């Protein structure tokens, strides 16, 4: 093999050159005694033309065979403007077969009708498809860009351990039985959180790592049990400075990978503003359809749903679907109502605005003055469709309208899918109250610093205690987030107590970490970004699985290797563990 | 905080500037009412001088407190040439305490008398020591240099999964119980070997990853259960081309990290030559003391040890310890003999050369002619000490003399510890025969390609079948190695069979992988380098633990977090596993 060029680089300027190419047979077709072969490698496709003298030898050559071809670059009679090498072809003078191939169970091309399970079983073939190669290479471009950025800013890439101590707080850990210490277990990290904070205690000042993380959570359609996180932490930096580092990374990334100039600083919404305007803390800001707070506007309207909601201390909000009244039949509005109900709304009220006033089941509850107030508040005009949710719970109103808003944004094509609209959401609440367990949970994690002015609310008013925490959001997806961390051991203990930990629990679970805070901990904070999700959005994919080389399927198995599998009894014996009497999963 | 400079950057040119520094109090001393504080951050140390007005406020400030200091850069009266900032100091105008610190359980300085267990328990303090910071930052420089090199050569960084299928071959796997598929287990990867080969099948052509690997092996003094590997694979490349890629990486690395120019190409030894000349496949070539093959030379000498060895088809080799006869007492030679015996040698024969001839217990077995032959073969002169081992087994001769050679090289200071002597060892045997289990094992792994000319020896003469495999060696350490891989499915099956696998075993264990080889596999090969070891050698450390931020100790526990630990019964219940009745390791 003495390859002179790859299959993506020959151009009209190369005509006349003697070349040797190597590649997979992507397509082979006969034209009389002539044979045309599209030769493919990771760089592209080049067409090779073989004259009749090769006819016999080429009979055995099939798709996905690997060939080495010698020949001359010639100008193509009928050019193919769709590929960069489309102006030329190779007139073959000789070739050899480097390896043969069995008939593949799927077509190797950008378009495939193969089931995803087949694609994952033959992942090495799925990854041969140019679109998948491009995704994986774009992912590399992304990590490369991020690394360059952080390297040049003096961040130190430090590896933290993957075999750690199990922590009951948070998601479920993957456990790894210890053979040396039988009955004991390591846990795979859900994130390097504690280690990166200890690296700040150690004085590294600026740390990053592109780290694998593991969560044994219940499976959803598009979640992976292992995922990759861009993990960043720094000392002696204000929140503004940290966000500046973060958005600088985004700017470079977008320039390097997409060639797009992002304007800085990114917009910032407080958590409350995001909830008020979009009903969600990861708003898709590529389109309007903003929520309107109607608590004041409808407070005198005699409609039971609004009345009851407001009397219970709740909320009424609406969306103006501008100009869409005529396009929404009763049936379509019923679909929206069903969507609202999946987010626990009791229903969806609506009005259509026309030249005479409004029409719809709740029109009768508004007197003229109330109606005018409403139309003004919602900036509504003839032809608009108005949607309303009222509920005693703020999150029900927000969740249901946010879902409807996102649905309509997509359905009505209110945005350009090639737009990338980044923003920060800041000033998150410290805690989330869980009705079921009747306790507060940390909205970020228990090491998040309250805003200085809210410190006392830890004890007096946890519900309204805000955190010095922030998320970065793109097109309705949370890309990641972070916070300033607590660096004062006393504050840390107060935060733990607000979360309902006893001193004993603190000592047992976090004692080893809290101990470290006592020896001169710098003020520090940082963030973590989900690399898989960034890659998915930048590649324009719908699934994380399209940007991970070897993903698991939705039941957390690998259709290619069949992992996980039963193991030999001797292996379990050595580990001192036994499998309980479940019907074991031998079918996998 | 409004830091203007770090603690490593102020110079005489900055005299007169107003600055603000932040750092940890590394040292505080009083001179009358004046107070001197050494302020430390990751960039260095700067001395601050406080006049008497601060005396009272400074009383509470102790070592490892974090201070923010404002002041003026002044020229130092007594300069300190040992540190880059030694020409200046800061005349403080104000300061504030950013955080306090408890008395640390160890001294934060390059020199420490803390036990390693203490250093690991308080790793965040150990890592504050400048020497440890430097190690971790050098490690980053290394990965950065390697990534740059590979990125620029079009290698694609691709992440492979950490939750995989268990493979019985090789070292012991760490297992991860699956909660979703109870009774089934994932395994943590011992290396990304199969995945990187499948990425070649997928057509990526050039892959790399700096990947964590896991081996649940029995513990030795300096081994970690998780370690990091620079993993590289490429397609359509000759062995020469692969080695060129590898040594180019080394050259750049040494230039970037150590400022040293390495000459290429690196020397290559065949495995056999390395064994003959150094007795070991990872020779330390910084010094001579080469082994001399004496099979021919002593074949007529009537010394039973030599005679028996040779008659059994064995070997006799010697080392000439030039000029050291006078320095080796009987007692010191006895020590060498003990060392030889730990490598299964039955003894160590020796001679001292003097002006009259030789002296020593075996002198009497040599006649004049035999002696002259010997002295010529060993290039021996008056004053030299000659050491010999004869044994029926080649490896006993080699192992014991290699151990003595390495011991003497260090003991006699035969090399400059700042020399970096890289080399390749190539043409390894495909197989190693294990007397105990009476079968052949793959010396690299079962996917290693035999040399083309040795293909038939797979069946006819496995012992002498050479592999297209290579190791890279530095100063007596194997940094890593690799091979061309088998890309022909038939050869792969023949290799499996030579290793004693039945078809059933192949199908069950490797079927999913071998299947992939059928669809157009390119010729491919690569290598893997041990990053921890490279970092250790480039940092001049003796222990891997000094270049890993959070290592495990020799009993595979983390003295800081105490991992592994027992876990809640509910966690095991969810996984469907139980711990057998061992005395569990609650003491940890």
Image: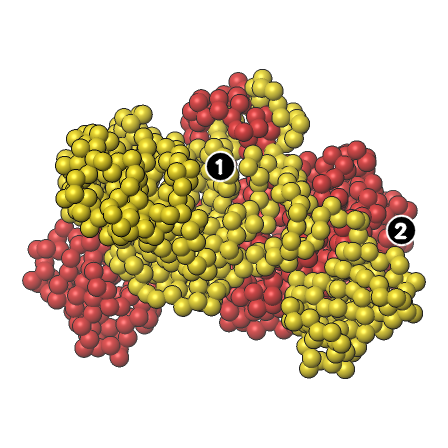
Chain colours: A yellow, B red
Report the Cα–Cα distance between label 2 and label 1: 52 Å
Chain of the residue displaying label 2: B
Identified at 52% across, 57% down, the residue is: A539
Identified at 17% across, 46% down, the residue is: A373
Element under disc 1: loop
Identified at 31% across, 25% down, the residue is: A437
Instruction: Depth check: give the residue in front, B188 or B406.
Output: B188
Q: Determine whether, in the image, residue A361 is placed left or right of residue A564.
A: left
| Residue A74 in the image, given as x and y percentages of width and height | 77, 78
Quarter residue B102 falls in: top left
In this orientation, does residue A182 appear?
Answer: yes
In the image, residue A92 above or below residue B387:
below
Residue under label 2, please give it.
B456
Instruction: Depth check: give the residue in front, A158 or B217.
Output: A158
Residue under label 1, please give it.
A220
Q: Which mark is residue B142?
A: none
| Residue B317 in the image, given as x and y percentages of width and height | 78, 55
Instruction: Depth check: give the residue in front, A392 or A18.
Output: A392
| Residue B337 in the image, given as x and y percentages of width and height | 68, 47
Which quadrant does the C terminus of chain A fall into?
A: top right
Element under disc 2: loop
In the image, residue B405 above or below residue A487:
below
- Callout 2 crowding tier (Cα within 10 Å): few <14, some 14–19, many ≥20: some
């Amino acid at each position: 093999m003495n390859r002179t060029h790859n299959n993506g680089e020959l151009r009209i300027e190369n005509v006349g050159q003697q070349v040797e190419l190597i590649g997979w047979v992507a397509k082979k077709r006969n034209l009389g005694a002539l044979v045309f072969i599209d030769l493919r490698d990771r760089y592209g496709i080049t067409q090779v033309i073989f004259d009749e003298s090769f006819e016999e030898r080429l009979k055995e050559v099939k798709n996905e065979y690997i060939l080495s071809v010698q020949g001359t670059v010639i100008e193509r009679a009928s050019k193919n403007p769709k590929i960069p090498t489309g102006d030329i072809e190779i007139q073959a003078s000789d070739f050899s077969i480097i390896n043969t191939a069995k008939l593949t169970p799927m077509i190797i091309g950008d378009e495939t009708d193969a089931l995803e399970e087949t694609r994952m079983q033959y992942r090495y073939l799925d990854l041969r498809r140019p679109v998948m190669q491009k995704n994986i290479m774009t992912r590399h471009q992304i990590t490369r860009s991020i690394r360059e950025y952080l390297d040049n800013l003096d961040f130190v890439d430090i590896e933290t351990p993957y075999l750690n101590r199990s922590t009951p707080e948070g998601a479920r850990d993957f456990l790894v039985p210890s053979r040396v210490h039988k009955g004991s277990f390591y846990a795979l990290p859900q994130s390097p959180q504690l280690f990166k904070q200890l690296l700040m205690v150690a004085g590294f000042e600026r740390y990053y790592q592109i780290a694998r993380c593991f969560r044994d959570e219940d499976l959803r359609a598009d979640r992976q049990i292992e995922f990759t996180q861009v993990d960043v932490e720094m000392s002696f930096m204000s929140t503004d400075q940290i966000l500046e580092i973060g958005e600088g990374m985004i700017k470079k990334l977008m320039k390097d990978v997409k060639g797009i100039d992002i304007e800085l600083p990114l917009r910032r919404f407080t958590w409350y503003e995001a909830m008020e305007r979009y009903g969600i803390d990861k708003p898709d800001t590529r389109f309007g359809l903003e929520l309107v707070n109607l608590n004041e506007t409808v407070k005198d309207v005699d409609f039971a749903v609004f009345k009851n909601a407001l009397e219970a201390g709740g909320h009424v909000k609406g969306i103006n679907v501008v100009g869409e009244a005529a396009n929404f039949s009763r049936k379509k509005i019923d679909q929206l109502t069903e969507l609202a109900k999946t987010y626990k709304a009791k229903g969806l009220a609506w009005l259509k605005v026309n030249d005479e006033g409004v029409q719809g089941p709740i029109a009768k509850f508004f007197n003229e003055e109330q109606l005018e107030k409403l139309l003004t508040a919602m900036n509504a005009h003839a032809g608009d469709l108005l949607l309303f949710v009222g509920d005693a719970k703020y999150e029900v109103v927000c969740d249901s309208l946010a879902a409807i808003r996102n649905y309509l944004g997509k359905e009505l094509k209110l945005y350009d899918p090639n737009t990338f609209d980044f923003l920060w959401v800041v000033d998150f609440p410290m805690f989330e109250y869980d009705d079921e367990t009747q306790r507060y949970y940390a909205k970020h994690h228990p090491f998040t610093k309250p805003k200085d002015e809210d410190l006392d609310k830890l004890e007096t008013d946890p519900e309204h205690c805000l955190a010095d925490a922030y998320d970065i959001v793109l097109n309705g997806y949370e890309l990641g987030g972070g916070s300033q961390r607590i660096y004062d051991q006393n504050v840390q203990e107060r935060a733990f107590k607000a979360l309902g930990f006893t001193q004993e629990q603190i000592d047992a679970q976090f004692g080893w970490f809290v101990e470290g805070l006592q020896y001169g901990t710098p003020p520090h904070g940082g963030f973590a970004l989900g690399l898989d999700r960034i890659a998915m959005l930048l590649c324009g994919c719908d699934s994380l699985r399209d940007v991970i080389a070897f993903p698991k399927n939705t039941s957390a198995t690998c259709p290619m290797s069949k992992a996980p599998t039963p193991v030999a009894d001797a292996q379990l014996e050595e580990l001192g563990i036994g499998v309980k009497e479940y019907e074991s999963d031998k079918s996998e």
